[in-house]
Amino acid sequence: MIFKLNLKKNKGIWFYGLSGSGKTHISKNLKKKIKNSVVVDGDNVRKLISNDLGYTKAHREIQINRIFGISKLIIESNKFPIISTVFMNKKVNNLCKKNKIMCVMVIRDNFIDIKKRHKTYKNKSNVVGEDIFFGKFKKLKLFNDNTPITFNISKG
């Protein structure tokens, strides 16, 4: 699979999708390809900054607003943020577009098998994809079928 990214057109990239879809793995691989990039993983932000939040939809919205702010700080420092979160909403997606952060929904093949094994899906409530859903907005999608992703990165 070839994924195209223009560094002149985009100031950052935000991967979002269900737990276990491969967002963190893709982010780490992309970081190796882009100089001056910074990975902003939603799980780490939750642990270090948003430890006052739970997992309700309202708290997830606060979390992605904070992550957007962190991403803006990174861009202001002339770095390229590579962000990964479980949740995304229309408001933050639109803010990202205005600020040239490409938003990409990561979708994993064979997700039913992953849901059986992944600890997140053992919870009974506040699970994105179970009782919390993405809003209706246009989504750029990356289908993770466990084959290597080739990043075609251009600077102009």
Image (cartoon, helix red, strand yellow):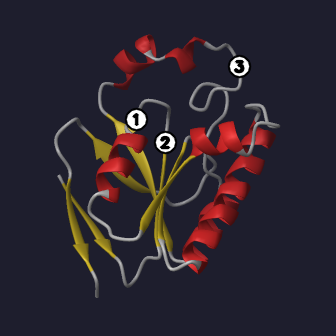
**Mark 3 is on which residue type?**
Ser
Q: Quadrant of the C terminus?
A: bottom left
Q: Is residue 132 above or below residue 121?
A: below
| Secondary structure found at label 1 | loop
The residue to which callout 3 is attached is 125
Q: Position of residue 77 (x, y in %)?
A: 57, 77
**Mark 2 is on which residue type?**
Gly
For the residues labelled 1 and 2, say whether their Cβ atoms are less than 8 Å apart. yes
Residue 99 visible in the snapshot: no
Give the left or right position of residue 54, taking residue 74 as reference.
right
Residue found at x 80% / y 42%:
58
The residue to which callout 2 is attached is 17
| Secondary structure found at label 2 | loop
| Earlier sequence position, callout 3 versus callout 2 | 2
Give the left or right position of residue 100, taking residue 33 as reference.
right
| Earlier sequence position, callout 3 versus callout 1 | 1
**Mark 1 is on which residue type?**
Ser
Q: Label 3 vs label 2: CA separation?
A: 17 Å
Q: Quadrant of residue 96?
A: bottom right
